Image: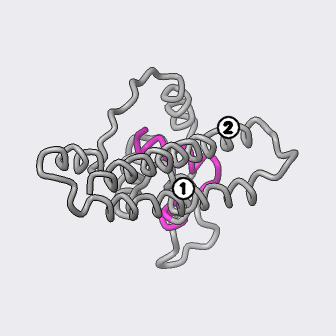
Amino acid sequence: MSLPHAILTALLEKPSSGLELTRRFDKSIGYFWSATHQQIYRELGRLEEAGLIRELPSEVPVRGQKKQYEVLDAGSAELARWVGESQDPKAVRDPLLLRIRAAAVVGPQGLAGELRRHLELHRRQLAVYEAIEEKDFPPGRDSDEDRLRRLVLHGGVGLETFWLRWLEEALAEVEDMT
């Protein structure tokens, strides 16, 4: 996924300022695609320059007022084009996996503690996803938009569940070596 497409998606859901986008990234999109405040602002400038978004006119111009952006037809068309585009999966690049491979050469000292720490981090993330599902997707909420959003959330739940199972297995193996 690319940042411009994440921003177009968020702006199509709701016209927003850069600050609002940053907060929304932290609360929703950030669970699977993160960006800093500076990256978002830079990309807003590029999208506006490319004619994909525009600043909403202010009813009363006030100095220091946040710029609100909306997606133009060209931005909607670009996002629709991108959705249907073919893209290969990205290779997993996780430093923890590299640490385990390195431990095969230098020994697993200290690795169990890191595995436990990752296990706790993934438990917390799974709890966050489960809380989101409970709050944002009560029974009966099944519009097409909600079904697709829930599908992304279930992907996150599945990934966290995988990591928990794998980390428990890895921890048991490492503890058995020490």
Position of 151 compared to 39: left or right? Answer: right
* Quarter of the view holding residue 88: top left
Between 11 and 25, which is closer to the camera in this rendering? 25
Q: Position of residue 100 (x, y in %)?
A: 25, 48
Residue name at image x 51 percent, y 62 percent: 26
Q: From the image, which quarter does the N terminus lie in?
A: top left
**Amino acid under disc 1:** Tyr
Residue name at image x 43 percent, y 46 percent: 169
Q: Which residues are magenta?
A: 1-22
Residue name at image x 35 percent, y 63 percent: 38
Q: Position of residue 171 (x, y in %)?
A: 38, 53
Residue 75 in magenta stretch: no
Residue density around tag 1, few if under 14, some if 14–19, many if 20 or more, within 10 Å: many
**Numbered disc in front, either 2 or 1:** 2
Between 105 and 178, which is closer to the camera in this rendering? 178
Position of 94 compared to 8: left or right? Answer: left
Visible residue check, residue 124: yes
Residue 69's tag is 1
Residue 5 in magenta stretch: yes
Q: Dot 1 lies on which element?
A: strand
**Amino acid under disc 2:** Leu
